[in-house]
Image: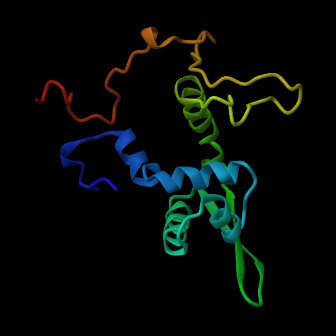
Amino acid sequence: MLNRTYDGQVCSIARTLEVLGERWTLLIVRDAMLGLRRFDEFQHSLGIARNVLTNRLKLLVEAGVLERSEYQQRPPRFEYRLTAVGLELCTPVVGLMHWGDRHLAGPDGLPRLTRHRACGGQLHAELVCEQCGATVADTDLELPPGPGLRADPIAAR
């Protein structure tokens, strides 16, 4: 995990990595998107140690990505579901998956497809301008300072 002090950084990516930056965490989110809900399902899918899974699930619940609800009382058993905040991760997770498909796919091809449930069409994670509706290429992307950036980190160096 990153140091939470950020050494003067004001960066949403660094803050996001505090929640999602550890490899097991993003794989838990992936499995939740695939419909897994229970501790044993996550553990079986990932082959992860129980203590590590317990810690990662706790972090995701505290961050509001997953919600924990009891489905059995004796003994108490819980399931984990994506919250609205967690569901917002679909776009970046699918974007990461598509990047991996393009650059790291194995010889047997894509392990998963992304399709629109209603019509069966292929899905693409893209940047779309909210003003004009255009799909924006990486060469047309700007990242100017926002109101939360206290100082230009490049100029400060």
**Front one among 52 and 92:** 52
Relative height, residue 95 to residue 71 (above, below): above
Q: Is residue 73 left or right of residue 138?
A: right
Q: What colour scheme has been applied to the protein in the rendered image? A: rainbow
Q: How many numbered marks does the figure carry? A: 0
Spot occupied by residue 73 in the image (x, y as percentages of width and height)? 77, 86
Give the residue displayed 72% in from the left and 80% down from the top: 77
Quarter of the rendering containing residue 5: bottom left
Give the residue displayed 54% in from the left and 60% down from the top: 60
**Front one among 151 and 134:** 134
Quarter holding the N terminus? bottom left
Quarter of the rendering containing residue 113: top right
Spot occupied by residue 48 in the image (x, y as percentages of width and height)? 55, 65
Q: Is residue 4 left or right of residue 92?
A: left
Relative height, residue 55 to residue 9 (above, below): below
The residue lying furthest to the right in this view is 119
Give the residue displayed 50% in from the left and 75% down from the top: 51
**Front one among 56 and 85:** 56
Spot occupied by residue 36 in the image (x, y as percentages of width and height)? 73, 58
Quarter of the rendering containing residue 129: top right
Spot occupied by residue 136 in the image (x, y as percentages of width and height)? 54, 12
The residue lying furthest to the front in this view is 107
The residue lying furthest to the left in this view is 157
Quarter holding the C terminus? top left
Relative height, residue 78 to residue 98 (above, below): below
